[in-house]
Image: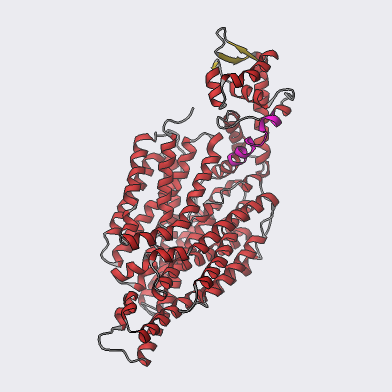
Amino acid sequence: MRQKGLGLIIIALMLGMLLAALDQTIVSTALPTIVSDLGGLEQLSWVVTGYLLASTVSTPLWGKLGDQYGRRGLFIGAIVIFLIGSALCGLSQNMGQLILFRSIQGLGGGGLMVLAQAIVGDVVPARERGRYQGFFGAVFAVSSIIGPLLGGLFVDHLSWHWVFYINLPVGAVALFVIIAVLPGHESRTRHKIDYAGVVTIGGATSCLVLIATWAGTMYAWTSPQILGLGLAAVALLIAAYFAERRAAEPIMPLKLFKLRAFTMTSIVGFVVGFGMFGALTYLPLYLQTVHGVSATLSGVHLLPMMAGMLTMSIVSGQIISRTGKYRFFPIAGTFTATVGMFMLSRLTETSSTLVMSIDLLVLGVGLGMTMQVLVIVVQNAVDFEDLGVATSGATFFRSIGGSFGVATLGAVFTGRLNADMAELVARTPIPPGVDPANIQKDPTLIQKLPEPLAQDFLHVYADAIATVFLVGTPVLFVAFLLSWFIPEQRLRETTKAMDYGEGMGATSAERSSLAEVERGLVRLADADLRKDYYVRLGQLAGLSGLPPQSVWVIARLGGEGWVKAADLAERAHVSREEGRPYVDRLTERGLVTRSPDGDSLRLTEQGDAVAERLLEQAKAGLGRLVADWGPSPQLLQLCERIAPELLGADADRPG
């Protein structure tokens, strides 16, 4: 039975996910303007890092709580938290407030992403779920492309505050629809939530990111602040180790690190996130400060990188699905990304738009060849029981890498800028009324300087940003070296059908192992339904003499009593007159009988037996798709549950 208001629910869920995914990238082109208004250039990286850290660390918690207490109320809560954070971000009066409120926003954003995808499984029948999963993958991909561009448009035509305010009306629509239409679901899954793991891993990560941000810039490496953070990080990591050893459902099982595939892909994924978000954060600053382009145009300049990522993510996924081979892609991808990062390190204040676009395209192509493939590697390396947590772990490390990348490269940028600025002031006469400290806080003031002096300051900024990419180059090269140690195994069938669009996001949903297999299974089945499924199913069930349309009628009537002929025709997207010949074939063979008035149909005893054979063949077909996971009662129950729904695929047009 189709869920009432399903279309509205899906739109609301997609809007919620769009908001969370957009806010990973939308601020990048607004950051130079935000710094100009609020100051705090040395804290710029934390506007991105605060959101990423909060959303990444909270994602497992949202997922488990949703399973345990119901997703509807928690999704509403996530929207409310996200909207409160968005409103406060727009009202921020200084950089400290903005960073704090971005963290609140990220906390809600983590819930939006994980719960939106989980709710789809609650409200969408299995026979249609593959199609809707594709829609949500597209949301991730589109948000990655348009995020920087939208941020620039808001800055140029409204103000940077609207980068956050725009979430309010969109989120309010999603909130209203969810409250009005989405029903509560009674099914609950009891969990022993690993609160200790969330706190210790999140705390240790935050301490390490703070060290990467402050050490050598705001504080000396031997200062009490940095040493204290280091000791706290070590203590929290030790606590996390013991917490994960004892947890019934650890968010990061330690046994996964015994697998070479998981360890290598985690490191490589960390570096991919490092490169992606590092580039996204500092390229708009280079474009707007050094080249003087508008915020909107800086978003346009980023399109080659984002397009390269999306295109190669899809292309590599298609090739892997057809060939079953994947090891080549992380090796070639990390090498290409290393070359792209090095090319970006050669940018100067005189570099042309064409050169910059080629550099960004090369980096994007490399990242796109690597991002989603790492998840495939992990999924093929683990046993079924660890599939869910290993998949979320792979995306966790990429997201944490993004946090470290932005923070570390921010420290590199600040340190080089300070050194270059001091050297410039020492060797260049500064006219009265020109304060280098103010220019360092607000780069837009460079445009008001006399030409020779302005060029000197532009060179300082160009050199500092080029240094960011120069430091990132050997980091990506290390990932290239490590990618050679990634093993290749035979590709599992359900892994071939994974959602490559979702890989564009920094964080992914926290799903159980069964949910991960189910996602791949329904996508495979959805594709199978569109490829003469009923012809093959009829042959397997001994109905080779019947057209596929007649086989579909038997499948639809199986397990039902009397069914209105008009309803059946509507589900098949045909008129009763068009469908009548196929029903006549069945009545002639004694498989279907008509009611005395001719308006209803039902299977005969012989027809019931045929419908049962069709169902058994459908279950067997699904069983073959999950057989490479090994014997599992859960997977057998999954096939038993999904097969009847797939046989009644309303959207399928048999033959």
Vertical comparison of 208 with 52: above or below: below
Left or right of residue 33, residue 127 in this image: right
Relative image position of residue 302 (x, y in whole percent) = 48, 64
- Asked where in the image residue 11 lies, by quadrant, the reply is top left
User: Residue, x 45% and y 69% (percent of image)?
Assistant: 283
Identify which residue is drawn at 42% across, 60% down: 149
Kindly tell me whether residue 558 is visible in this rendering: no
> In what quadrant of the picture does the C terminus appear?
top right
Q: Measured from the top left, where is residue 414 in percent x and y?
A: 40, 77
Q: Nearer the viewer, residue 42 or 393?
A: 42
Q: Please determine whether, in this image, residue 272 is positioned above or below residue 640.
A: below
Image quadrant in which you'd find residue 440 = bottom left
Residue 100 on the magenta segment: no
Give x and y (percent) for residue 375: 58, 54
Q: Is residue 528 magenta?
A: yes
**Which residues, given as a range, are shown in magenta?**
522-537
